[in-house]
Image (spheres, helix red, strand yellow):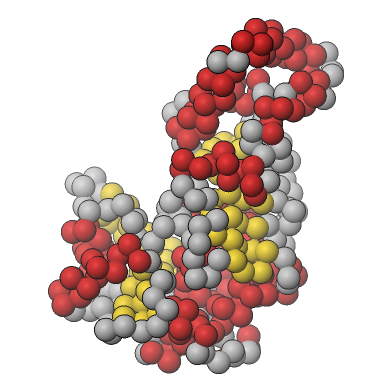
Amino acid sequence: MAYSKIYPVPQISSVQDMIIKSASKYGDKIALEDLNPTLIPKLTYAQLLTNVLKFGISLNSLGINESAHIAVISENRVQWALTYLTAMAFNMVIVPIDKNLPSNEILNIIHESESEAIIFSKMFENFFREKKDTLLRLKYFISMDLLSAKNDFHSMTELINNSTLISISKLPKINPSDLAQIIFTSGSLGRAKGVMLTQKNLSSNLMAMCSLVEMKPADKFLSVLPIHHTYECTCGLLCPIYSGSSVHYARSLKTIVDDLQNVKATILLGVPLLYDKMFKKIYKSIREDKIKSKIVPPLIKISDFAARVGWKDFKKIVFKELHQKFGGAVRLFIAGGRRQIPKLQKDCRNLDLILYRVMD
């Protein structure tokens, strides 16, 4: 789908500025939710700001201050987003790490990024216990899943719960041009290289994105793609928080369709391969149904003709049942990547689903 309209967007000077303004504007509205059970399963915008302030001041109390590099590694979840936003609010440098990397690459990124703290989920607890003595620069190990501190590993929830809530006025002043994030991507020689971003880079990018793709407070994003990646982090976390939407973290790749239905998600961020698998599943169910296999293909052709002559609602009426397979609320698929885009566009047009392609 071509970009045909520029939407007016509020101006922000930094990600910190965005967090404060969104909390003030959207208050008790849901911001983040885990569909898997976790220690912090859901946060409203007001609670998100409160948790950012409490977690940030607790990190300061440990000795993690402005400009400190902190790494984060876990599956998609509320606490990942909370860690990221806390770093931005407290003028730290966040280092997202791909949870699927080999152990030697994870260790290399921690070393190369000069991180002094690592925040991680339970799946990495044994790994960091084994490697703790080799990570000489790492001073602080913070678990998302421990209920209380254990053997020099801090508990993220304990740090938050035992912290004192500070005033917004106590937050550090942000220079939008200072380093805020280091993203490690595969280099030409196979070794990961760090890309440095500022809060100005991030805030400018998300304002530009939201001026092209309309995102509303009523929107519900289902987050599926790895959150450490710039695409998902910007479009699937920062843009929704900026727009007052809610982000819901899927249970797994296998549960996407069920999660879409349960959440009544309106926007899904994906790549062509993900959508291709979803459409194959739908078309398979059509082929296996004796009645649908005979009537759906002709209906696609008839609906295409109806759309050309101006009856745009015909597809919505005809394919209402199919739309229910996506939860009945999806208004927009956002696709990144180049491969299979023409086929994906055709599949979406056939079933009256809107597709936005946002990057090559």
Q: Residue furthest right?
A: 310
Query: Is residue 175 in view?
Result: no
Task: Pick the residue in front: 46 or 2.
Answer: 46
| Image x and y of residue 216, in percent | 73, 53
Q: Is residue 325 above or below residue 297?
A: below
Q: Say which residue appears at 72% left-offset and 24% top-offset.
A: 319
Nearer the observer, 169 or 237: 237
- Tally of marks: 0
* Residue occupying the point 39% across, 61% down: 74
Asked whether, in this view, residue 144 is left or right of residue 236, the answer is: left
**Residue drawn at x 58%, y 49% as measured from the top left:** 222
Find residue 16 and report its horizontal and vertical position in percent. Answer: 58, 73
Q: Residue at x 52, y 26 (%)?
A: 281
Image side of residue 231 versus residue 258, left or right: left
Query: Residue 261's image quarter?
Result: top right
Query: Can you say whether 97 is above or below 190 in the image?
Result: below
Please say if 268 is above or below 130.
above
Look at the image and tell me whether residue 279 can be seen.
yes
Q: Answer left or right for 214 relative to 101.
A: right
- Considering only vertical position in the picture, is 111 above or below 148? above
State the image coordinates of residue 351 (x, y, percent, origin top left).
67, 24
Whole-percent x, y for residue 163 in the image: 51, 89
Classify the position of the N terminus by image quarter.
top right
Residue sitting nearer the eye, 300 or 71: 300
